[in-house]
């Protein structure tokens, strides 16, 4: 099912025209209503008149997370406070949060794009959907909530945590959809097993997972453990929250709602636009938002874009899985390492659980790199020699994928701390020194 066929299946030519019109309108809005944007554009010698088509976007300056910090809390709003009806925030790694403001119309847009996502997963008005993203300042809970309400489904606003109750209500209320982070979904999968309630008594069929990078291996794991189809849900606070993009039934790339959020891929170092298909940093311009439109926002997320029409009939551009964030990348002994590469190796080895931790340190000026991973119950009790063999095999696979050999530490099942929101996979002790 397609929620908004006009927008999701529009020809490329019409889409670019529409994007051009919407961009022009947004540029005028921010230029006249938001001082920091006007200043930035003046410094670059650009006026709203220079923006006539979507191709002119490259003339505009970038914005970044640090701009949101610099103009904390409300300096980047393009409407008076009287027009703002909702504030959300995301906790930065340090200091003050990133704050975003929505007008009534922005909330409608959020519901609309969310509806496209949940419809494409196959959910509809007959379904109970359990929202186990955190509610509150984090956009996950309220964003998924609005999506389910817009499609007319029955939303079960669980928020995260309270796992036993999650399982009880999932069973008693017959939840068909589950929206949460992939790492929390894994946690719920174990809890479901522990509950000893037979799987047939649950109606769960569909997962809407996002808010953190996850791999194909993790998808397989979740689909098998939960007996569902697991779909990607993408978004970020600055742009709107969950609903910026979604997978369809073919699970072959994340469709972006590009009539609202215009994507570009740039070189993460130079900021130069890259050709279609190249991997680089994803940049978004919101072209319909009123409260806090962002132009050319540097997401730090690394991906590539595919403009081919999808088998589902949607023409909307698809992005490949997020490889990681530019700032997620670890440099260990000079080699670039993404946690997602480690995850893909771990998920391909049947004796392992998809729970892992990367610990990096610097000892005597040398980087140390340890990968801790849980071994499945059935294998943990195996003889020592078999475990040693397994360890050797994992080191070998990691070495060939990463180009660097970590110390592998096999740990007991359920010993790595579980997360109820975004998982923490890396401890970089070098940062603390
Ligand atoms: O995580 C919004 C969200 C909530 C998306 C629920 C999906 C579901 P932030 O806290 O601002 O917003 O974090 C945004 O999380 O730039 C990515 O690095 C990462 N991220 C979000 N969704 C995905 C995904 C929400 N599906 C940051 N795959 C983004 C990979 C994701 N990474």
Image (cartoon, helix red, strand yellow):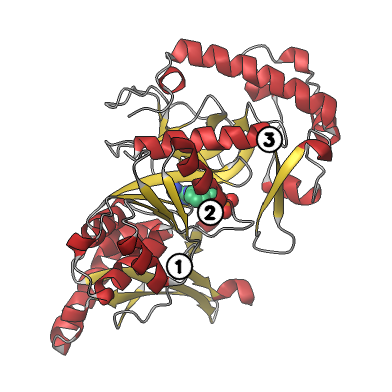
Q: Quadrant of the N terminus?
A: top left
Q: Quadrant of residue 353?
A: bottom left
Residue found at x 35% / y 23%: 308
Confirm or deny contact between disc 3 and disc 1 (CB under 8 A). Answer: no
Where residue 398 appears, x then y in whole percent?
30, 64
Task: Indicate whether 4 appears above or below 327.
Answer: above
Of labels 2 and 1, the one closer to you? 2
Residue found at x 49% / y 62%: 422
The label on residue 425 is: 1
- Name the residue carrying label 3: 104
Task: Indicate whether 176 appears above or below 19.
Answer: below
Among the two numbered marks 2 and 3 on one chain, the one whose residue lies closer to the N terminus: 3
Q: Cα distance, mark 3 to mark 1? A: 37 Å
Where residue 148 appears, x then y in whole percent?
46, 43
90 to the left or right of 248? right
Where residue 316 appears, x then y in whole percent?
42, 25
Q: Cα distance, mark 2 to mark 1? A: 22 Å
Where residue 356 appears, x then y in whole percent?
37, 71
């Amino acid at each position: 099912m397609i929620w908004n066929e006009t927008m999701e299946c529009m020809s490329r030519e019409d889409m670019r025209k529409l994007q051009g019109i919407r961009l022009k309108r947004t540029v005028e809005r921010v230029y006249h209503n938001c001082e920091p944007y006007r200043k930035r554009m003046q410094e670059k010698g650009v006026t709203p008149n220079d923006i006539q088509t979507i191709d002119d976007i490259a003339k505009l300056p970038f914005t970044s997370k640090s701009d949101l910090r610099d103009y904390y809390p409300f300096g980047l709003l393009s409407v008076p406070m009287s027009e703002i009806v909702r504030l959300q925030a995301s906790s930065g790694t340090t200091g003050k949060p990133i704050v975003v403001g929505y007008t009534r119309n922005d909330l409608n847009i959020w519901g609309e794009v969310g509806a496209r996502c949940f419809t494409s997963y196959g959910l509809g008005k007959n379904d109970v959907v359990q929202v186990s993203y955190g509610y509150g300042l984090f956009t996950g809970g309220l964003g998924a909530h609005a999506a389910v309400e817009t499609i007319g489904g029955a939303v079960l606003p669980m928020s995260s945590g309270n796992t036993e109750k999650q399982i009880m209500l999932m069973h008693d209320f017959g939840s068909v959809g589950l929206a949460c982070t992939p790492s929390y979904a894994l946690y719920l999968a174990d809890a479901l097993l522990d509950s000893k309630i037979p799987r047939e008594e649950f109606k769960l069929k569909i997962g809407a997972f996002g808010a953190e990078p996850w791999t194909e291996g993790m998808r397989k794991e979740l689909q098998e453990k939960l007996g569902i189809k697991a779909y990607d849900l993408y978004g970020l606070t600055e742009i709107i929250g969950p609903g910026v993009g979604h997978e369809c039934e073919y699970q072959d790339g994340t469709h972006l709602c590009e009539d609202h959020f215009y994507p570009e891929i740039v070189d993460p170092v130079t900021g130069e636009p890259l050709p279609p298909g190249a991997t680089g940093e994803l940049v978004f311009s919101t072209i319909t938002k009123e409260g806090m439109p962002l132009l050319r926002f540097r997401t730090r997320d690394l991906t590539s874009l595919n403009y081919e029409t999808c088998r589902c009939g949607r023409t909307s551009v698809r992005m490949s899985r997020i490889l990681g964030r530019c700032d997620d990348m670890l440099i260990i002994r000079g080699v670039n390492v993404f946690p997602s590469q480690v995850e893909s190796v771990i998920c391909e080895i049947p004796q392992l659980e998809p729970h892992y931790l990367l610990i990096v340190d610097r000892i005597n000026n040398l980087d140390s790199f340890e990968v801790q991973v849980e071994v499945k119950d059935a294998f943990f009790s195996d003889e020592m020699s078999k475990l040693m063999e397994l360890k050797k095999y994992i080191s070998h696979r990691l070495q060939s994928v990463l180009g660097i050999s970590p110390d592998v530490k096999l740990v007991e099942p359920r010993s790595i701390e579980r997360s109820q929101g975004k998982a923490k996979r890396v401890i970089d002790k070098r940062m603390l020194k």
